[in-house]
Amino acid sequence: MTKQDIRDFTRQELAGTLISLGEKGSRIDKVFNCLYRKGAESFEAMEGVQAELKAKLAGLYSIAAAPAVEKRVSKLDGTIKLLFTFPDGAKAESVVLFNKKTVSACISSQSGCACGCTFCATGGLGLKRDLRPHEILAQFAACRKEAGRAPDSLVFMGMGEPFMNWANVKKSVLLLSDNKGVNFPQTKITVSTVGVVPVIRELAESHLEIRLAVSLITADEKQRAELTPMSKKYSLREIIGAARYYTDRTKKMVFFEYILFDGLNDSPDDARKLLALVKDVPCKVNLIMYNPNPGGKAYTPGRFEKGKAFQDIMVEAGIRTHMRREKGTDIAAACGQLAAAPEAS
Protein backbone atom coordinates (compact mmCIF):
# COMPACT_ATOMS: atom_id res chain seq x y z
CA MET A 1 0.00 0.00 0.00
CA THR A 2 1.37 3.41 -1.03
CA LYS A 3 2.01 5.77 1.86
CA GLN A 4 0.32 9.17 1.79
CA ASP A 5 2.63 12.13 1.28
CA ILE A 6 2.70 14.03 4.57
CA ARG A 7 2.77 17.34 2.65
CA ASP A 8 -0.83 16.73 1.58
CA PHE A 9 -2.06 17.52 5.10
CA THR A 10 -3.31 20.97 6.06
CA ARG A 11 -1.98 22.26 9.38
CA GLN A 12 -5.21 21.22 11.11
CA GLU A 13 -5.00 17.71 9.63
CA LEU A 14 -1.32 17.43 10.54
CA ALA A 15 -2.09 18.53 14.09
CA GLY A 16 -4.80 15.87 14.40
CA THR A 17 -2.42 13.20 13.11
CA LEU A 18 0.42 14.16 15.44
CA ILE A 19 -1.89 14.47 18.44
CA SER A 20 -3.07 10.91 17.75
CA LEU A 21 0.60 9.90 17.94
CA GLY A 22 0.90 11.56 21.34
CA GLU A 23 2.66 14.73 20.15
CA LYS A 24 1.95 18.27 21.36
CA GLY A 25 1.84 21.84 20.07
CA SER A 26 5.47 22.89 19.74
CA ARG A 27 6.46 19.74 17.85
CA ILE A 28 3.47 20.09 15.51
CA ASP A 29 4.54 23.64 14.61
CA LYS A 30 8.14 22.50 14.03
CA VAL A 31 7.07 19.74 11.65
CA PHE A 32 4.74 22.09 9.73
CA ASN A 33 7.43 24.75 9.56
CA CYS A 34 9.97 22.28 8.20
CA LEU A 35 7.59 21.05 5.51
CA TYR A 36 6.06 24.29 4.28
CA ARG A 37 8.41 27.14 5.18
CA LYS A 38 11.80 25.43 4.96
CA GLY A 39 10.76 22.98 2.23
CA ALA A 40 12.27 19.84 3.78
CA GLU A 41 12.61 17.19 1.06
CA SER A 42 13.04 14.25 3.44
CA PHE A 43 12.22 13.35 7.03
CA GLU A 44 15.93 13.41 7.82
CA ALA A 45 16.13 17.02 6.66
CA MET A 46 13.62 18.22 9.28
CA GLU A 47 15.77 20.48 11.43
CA GLY A 48 14.88 20.63 15.12
CA VAL A 49 12.53 17.62 14.98
CA GLN A 50 13.47 14.75 17.29
CA ALA A 51 14.90 11.65 15.61
CA GLU A 52 12.25 9.45 17.25
CA LEU A 53 9.43 11.51 15.71
CA LYS A 54 11.14 11.59 12.31
CA ALA A 55 11.37 7.78 12.35
CA LYS A 56 7.73 7.47 13.42
CA LEU A 57 6.55 9.75 10.61
CA ALA A 58 8.75 8.02 8.03
CA GLY A 59 7.14 4.72 8.97
CA LEU A 60 3.65 6.07 8.34
CA TYR A 61 4.03 8.63 5.56
CA SER A 62 6.18 9.52 2.57
CA ILE A 63 7.85 12.59 1.10
CA ALA A 64 7.94 12.13 -2.67
CA ALA A 65 11.03 13.03 -4.64
CA ALA A 66 11.00 16.50 -6.18
CA PRO A 67 9.70 16.58 -9.77
CA ALA A 68 12.11 17.00 -12.65
CA VAL A 69 11.74 20.47 -14.16
CA GLU A 70 12.46 21.64 -17.71
CA LYS A 71 12.54 25.36 -18.43
CA ARG A 72 11.82 27.40 -21.53
CA VAL A 73 12.10 31.18 -21.85
CA SER A 74 10.23 33.32 -24.38
CA LYS A 75 12.43 35.42 -26.63
CA LEU A 76 9.45 37.73 -27.19
CA ASP A 77 8.67 38.83 -23.64
CA GLY A 78 10.70 36.82 -21.12
CA THR A 79 7.80 34.59 -20.09
CA ILE A 80 9.05 31.40 -18.42
CA LYS A 81 7.38 28.02 -18.91
CA LEU A 82 8.20 25.12 -16.58
CA LEU A 83 7.46 21.51 -17.45
CA PHE A 84 7.20 19.28 -14.37
CA THR A 85 7.59 15.52 -14.55
CA PHE A 86 6.52 13.87 -11.30
CA PRO A 87 8.05 10.57 -10.06
CA ASP A 88 5.25 8.46 -11.60
CA GLY A 89 5.72 10.12 -15.02
CA ALA A 90 2.72 12.46 -14.83
CA LYS A 91 3.42 15.87 -16.36
CA ALA A 92 2.13 19.39 -15.80
CA GLU A 93 3.15 22.91 -16.78
CA SER A 94 3.36 26.26 -15.02
CA VAL A 95 4.03 29.72 -16.43
CA VAL A 96 5.69 32.79 -14.90
CA LEU A 97 4.57 36.06 -16.53
CA PHE A 98 6.41 39.34 -16.10
CA ASN A 99 4.52 42.61 -16.38
CA LYS A 100 5.87 46.15 -15.93
CA LYS A 101 5.81 46.07 -12.16
CA THR A 102 4.25 42.75 -11.25
CA VAL A 103 4.80 39.02 -11.64
CA SER A 104 2.06 36.42 -12.09
CA ALA A 105 2.30 32.65 -11.74
CA CYS A 106 -0.08 30.34 -13.61
CA ILE A 107 -0.19 26.80 -12.25
CA SER A 108 -1.87 23.50 -13.09
CA SER A 109 -4.37 21.49 -11.06
CA GLN A 110 -4.33 18.30 -13.14
CA SER A 111 -2.07 16.38 -15.47
CA GLY A 112 -4.08 16.66 -18.67
CA CYS A 113 -7.78 17.54 -18.60
CA ALA A 114 -11.08 15.71 -19.03
CA CYS A 115 -13.05 18.69 -20.38
CA GLY A 116 -12.04 18.10 -24.00
CA CYS A 117 -12.38 21.70 -25.22
CA THR A 118 -11.67 21.54 -28.95
CA PHE A 119 -9.54 24.71 -29.00
CA CYS A 120 -7.29 23.73 -26.08
CA ALA A 121 -4.05 21.75 -26.31
CA THR A 122 -4.51 20.37 -22.80
CA GLY A 123 -8.00 19.15 -23.66
CA GLY A 124 -6.54 17.05 -26.46
CA LEU A 125 -4.47 15.08 -23.94
CA GLY A 126 -7.36 13.73 -21.91
CA LEU A 127 -7.06 13.42 -18.14
CA LYS A 128 -3.96 11.63 -16.87
CA ARG A 129 -4.61 12.22 -13.16
CA ASP A 130 -5.37 14.83 -10.52
CA LEU A 131 -2.47 16.65 -8.89
CA ARG A 132 -2.03 16.38 -5.14
CA PRO A 133 -1.56 19.45 -2.90
CA HIS A 134 2.21 18.93 -2.55
CA GLU A 135 2.52 18.77 -6.36
CA ILE A 136 0.62 22.04 -6.70
CA LEU A 137 2.82 23.65 -4.04
CA ALA A 138 5.93 22.36 -5.84
CA GLN A 139 4.84 24.39 -8.88
CA PHE A 140 4.36 27.49 -6.76
CA ALA A 141 7.82 27.09 -5.19
CA ALA A 142 9.45 26.69 -8.61
CA CYS A 143 7.63 29.75 -9.99
CA ARG A 144 8.67 31.79 -6.95
CA LYS A 145 12.28 30.71 -7.48
CA GLU A 146 12.23 31.72 -11.15
CA ALA A 147 10.60 35.07 -10.34
CA GLY A 148 13.16 35.78 -7.61
CA ARG A 149 10.35 36.62 -5.20
CA ALA A 150 6.78 35.71 -4.34
CA PRO A 151 4.49 36.45 -7.29
CA ASP A 152 1.99 39.29 -7.00
CA SER A 153 -0.80 37.00 -8.13
CA LEU A 154 -1.40 33.30 -8.56
CA VAL A 155 -3.89 31.82 -11.02
CA PHE A 156 -5.15 28.26 -11.42
CA MET A 157 -5.40 28.60 -15.19
CA GLY A 158 -2.83 26.04 -16.27
CA MET A 159 -3.54 22.44 -17.18
CA GLY A 160 -6.75 20.88 -15.90
CA GLU A 161 -10.13 21.98 -14.57
CA PRO A 162 -9.54 23.06 -10.94
CA PHE A 163 -13.15 22.44 -9.89
CA MET A 164 -12.90 18.80 -11.02
CA ASN A 165 -10.04 18.39 -8.53
CA TRP A 166 -11.53 20.73 -5.97
CA ALA A 167 -10.61 18.79 -2.80
CA ASN A 168 -6.91 18.97 -3.66
CA VAL A 169 -7.05 22.53 -5.00
CA LYS A 170 -8.86 23.72 -1.87
CA LYS A 171 -6.23 22.05 0.33
CA SER A 172 -3.45 23.67 -1.68
CA VAL A 173 -5.10 27.09 -1.21
CA LEU A 174 -5.28 26.51 2.55
CA LEU A 175 -1.62 25.42 2.63
CA LEU A 176 -0.44 28.34 0.51
CA SER A 177 -2.30 30.87 2.64
CA ASP A 178 -1.43 29.39 6.06
CA ASN A 179 0.40 32.10 8.04
CA LYS A 180 2.72 29.50 9.57
CA GLY A 181 3.69 28.24 6.14
CA VAL A 182 3.95 29.96 2.76
CA ASN A 183 1.66 32.80 3.94
CA PHE A 184 0.46 33.75 0.44
CA PRO A 185 -2.79 35.80 0.63
CA GLN A 186 -5.94 34.12 -0.64
CA THR A 187 -7.04 37.47 -2.05
CA LYS A 188 -4.20 37.18 -4.59
CA ILE A 189 -5.34 33.75 -5.82
CA THR A 190 -7.77 33.29 -8.73
CA VAL A 191 -9.29 29.94 -9.72
CA SER A 192 -10.61 29.59 -13.25
CA THR A 193 -13.34 27.13 -14.22
CA VAL A 194 -15.11 26.28 -17.44
CA GLY A 195 -18.30 26.24 -15.37
CA VAL A 196 -18.65 23.43 -12.82
CA VAL A 197 -21.84 24.79 -11.28
CA PRO A 198 -22.02 22.85 -7.97
CA VAL A 199 -18.47 23.89 -7.00
CA ILE A 200 -19.10 27.54 -7.93
CA ARG A 201 -21.98 27.42 -5.47
CA GLU A 202 -19.86 25.62 -2.87
CA LEU A 203 -17.17 28.29 -3.20
CA ALA A 204 -19.83 30.97 -2.70
CA GLU A 205 -20.81 29.34 0.61
CA SER A 206 -17.22 28.87 1.81
CA HIS A 207 -15.01 31.20 3.82
CA LEU A 208 -12.31 31.18 1.16
CA GLU A 209 -11.30 34.63 -0.12
CA ILE A 210 -10.00 33.52 -3.52
CA ARG A 211 -11.34 35.11 -6.70
CA LEU A 212 -13.45 33.32 -9.29
CA ALA A 213 -12.94 33.35 -13.06
CA VAL A 214 -15.38 31.61 -15.40
CA SER A 215 -14.47 30.69 -18.98
CA LEU A 216 -17.64 31.49 -20.88
CA ILE A 217 -15.72 31.10 -24.17
CA THR A 218 -18.75 32.29 -26.13
CA ALA A 219 -22.24 33.60 -25.37
CA ASP A 220 -24.04 31.27 -27.79
CA GLU A 221 -25.26 28.00 -26.24
CA LYS A 222 -25.10 25.93 -29.44
CA GLN A 223 -21.67 27.29 -30.33
CA ARG A 224 -20.38 26.62 -26.82
CA ALA A 225 -21.55 23.01 -27.02
CA GLU A 226 -19.38 22.58 -30.12
CA LEU A 227 -16.36 24.15 -28.41
CA THR A 228 -16.55 22.42 -25.03
CA PRO A 229 -18.32 19.14 -24.14
CA MET A 230 -18.86 20.47 -20.59
CA SER A 231 -21.80 22.46 -21.98
CA LYS A 232 -23.79 19.22 -22.15
CA LYS A 233 -23.68 19.07 -18.37
CA TYR A 234 -24.01 22.74 -17.39
CA SER A 235 -25.76 25.26 -19.62
CA LEU A 236 -24.76 28.92 -19.91
CA ARG A 237 -27.94 29.83 -18.05
CA GLU A 238 -26.96 27.60 -15.12
CA ILE A 239 -23.39 28.91 -15.13
CA ILE A 240 -24.47 32.55 -15.12
CA GLY A 241 -26.96 31.75 -12.37
CA ALA A 242 -24.18 30.21 -10.25
CA ALA A 243 -21.90 33.18 -10.94
CA ARG A 244 -24.66 35.58 -9.88
CA TYR A 245 -25.14 33.53 -6.69
CA TYR A 246 -21.40 33.78 -6.03
CA THR A 247 -21.40 37.56 -6.39
CA ASP A 248 -24.50 37.90 -4.20
CA ARG A 249 -23.03 35.77 -1.42
CA THR A 250 -19.45 37.04 -1.47
CA LYS A 251 -19.97 40.65 -2.61
CA LYS A 252 -17.08 40.10 -5.04
CA MET A 253 -17.10 40.49 -8.78
CA VAL A 254 -16.54 37.51 -11.06
CA PHE A 255 -14.16 37.48 -14.02
CA PHE A 256 -15.63 36.21 -17.29
CA GLU A 257 -13.21 34.96 -19.93
CA TYR A 258 -14.29 35.15 -23.56
CA ILE A 259 -12.14 33.73 -26.38
CA LEU A 260 -12.21 35.57 -29.69
CA PHE A 261 -12.23 33.37 -32.81
CA ASP A 262 -12.18 35.18 -36.15
CA GLY A 263 -15.58 35.04 -37.85
CA LEU A 264 -17.04 32.75 -35.21
CA ASN A 265 -17.94 34.84 -32.16
CA ASP A 266 -16.37 38.28 -32.61
CA SER A 267 -19.08 40.33 -34.33
CA PRO A 268 -21.03 43.25 -32.83
CA ASP A 269 -24.05 40.91 -32.54
CA ASP A 270 -21.89 38.49 -30.54
CA ALA A 271 -20.87 41.34 -28.24
CA ARG A 272 -24.52 42.21 -27.67
CA LYS A 273 -25.26 38.53 -26.90
CA LEU A 274 -22.54 38.53 -24.27
CA LEU A 275 -23.80 41.82 -22.89
CA ALA A 276 -27.33 40.42 -22.50
CA LEU A 277 -25.88 37.42 -20.66
CA VAL A 278 -23.71 39.24 -18.10
CA LYS A 279 -25.25 42.72 -17.76
CA ASP A 280 -26.78 42.11 -14.33
CA VAL A 281 -23.76 40.29 -12.84
CA PRO A 282 -21.00 42.32 -11.12
CA CYS A 283 -18.12 41.34 -13.37
CA LYS A 284 -15.10 42.13 -15.43
CA VAL A 285 -14.75 40.59 -18.89
CA ASN A 286 -11.40 39.46 -20.24
CA LEU A 287 -11.25 39.13 -24.03
CA ILE A 288 -8.63 36.57 -25.08
CA MET A 289 -7.49 36.07 -28.64
CA TYR A 290 -7.52 32.38 -29.57
CA ASN A 291 -4.01 30.93 -29.52
CA PRO A 292 -3.46 28.23 -32.15
CA ASN A 293 -2.09 24.85 -31.11
CA PRO A 294 -0.82 22.15 -33.48
CA GLY A 295 -3.03 19.36 -32.15
CA GLY A 296 -6.28 21.34 -32.01
CA LYS A 297 -9.01 22.05 -34.53
CA ALA A 298 -8.37 24.66 -37.22
CA TYR A 299 -9.67 27.89 -35.71
CA THR A 300 -8.45 31.36 -36.67
CA PRO A 301 -7.41 33.87 -34.00
CA GLY A 302 -9.56 36.95 -33.64
CA ARG A 303 -8.32 40.21 -35.14
CA PHE A 304 -7.42 43.22 -33.05
CA GLU A 305 -9.72 45.65 -34.88
CA LYS A 306 -12.77 43.43 -34.40
CA GLY A 307 -11.77 42.74 -30.81
CA LYS A 308 -11.52 46.46 -30.11
CA ALA A 309 -14.98 47.07 -31.58
CA PHE A 310 -16.30 44.20 -29.42
CA GLN A 311 -14.67 45.76 -26.35
CA ASP A 312 -16.11 49.19 -27.13
CA ILE A 313 -19.67 47.82 -27.19
CA MET A 314 -19.18 46.22 -23.78
CA VAL A 315 -17.51 49.27 -22.22
CA GLU A 316 -20.15 51.67 -23.56
CA ALA A 317 -22.76 49.52 -21.81
CA GLY A 318 -20.89 49.86 -18.51
CA ILE A 319 -19.12 46.48 -18.41
CA ARG A 320 -15.43 46.60 -17.47
CA THR A 321 -13.79 44.82 -20.41
CA HIS A 322 -10.09 44.18 -20.96
CA MET A 323 -8.39 42.84 -24.08
CA ARG A 324 -5.72 40.59 -22.67
CA ARG A 325 -2.32 40.62 -24.26
CA GLU A 326 -1.13 37.03 -24.51
CA LYS A 327 2.49 36.26 -23.64
CA GLY A 328 4.82 33.37 -24.32
CA THR A 329 3.23 32.33 -27.61
CA ASP A 330 6.63 31.41 -29.09
CA ILE A 331 7.10 28.75 -26.38
CA ALA A 332 3.46 27.57 -26.36
CA ALA A 333 2.88 29.15 -22.95
CA ALA A 334 -0.21 31.21 -23.78
CA CYS A 335 -3.80 30.44 -22.86
CA GLY A 336 -4.92 27.09 -24.36
CA GLN A 337 -1.42 26.06 -25.48
CA LEU A 338 -0.18 24.02 -22.51
CA ALA A 339 0.37 20.44 -23.67
CA ALA A 340 3.09 19.16 -21.30
CA ALA A 341 5.40 18.50 -24.22
CA PRO A 342 9.19 18.68 -23.81
CA GLU A 343 11.13 21.06 -26.05
CA ALA A 344 12.01 19.52 -29.38
CA SER A 345 15.72 18.90 -29.76
Image: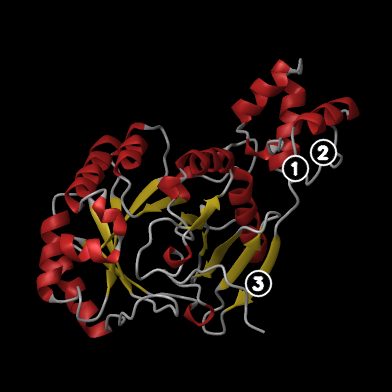
Precedes in sequence: disc 2 or disc 1? 2
Quadrant containing the C terminus in the rendered view: bottom right
Cβ–Cβ under 8 Å for marks 2 and 1: yes
Instruction: Report whether 203 appears left or right of 157.
Output: left
Which badge, 1 or 3, comes first in the chain's sequence? 1
Check the image and report above or below for 304 versus 124: below
Q: Residue type at mark 2?
A: Phe
What x and y, as percent, mark residue 168? 52, 41
The kind of residue tagged 3 is Lys
| Quadrant (top left, top right, bottom left, bottom right) of the N terminus | top right
Residue, disc 3: 71
- According to the picture, the residue beneath numbered tag 2 turns out to be 43
Seen in the image, is 139 located left or right of residue 292? Answer: right
Q: Is mark 1 on a helix, strand or loop?
A: loop
Classify residue 314 by image quadrant. Answer: bottom left
> Which residue is depicted at the point 58% across and 50% down?
136
Compared to 316, does 298 lie above or below?
A: below
Q: Name the residue under label 1.
A: 63
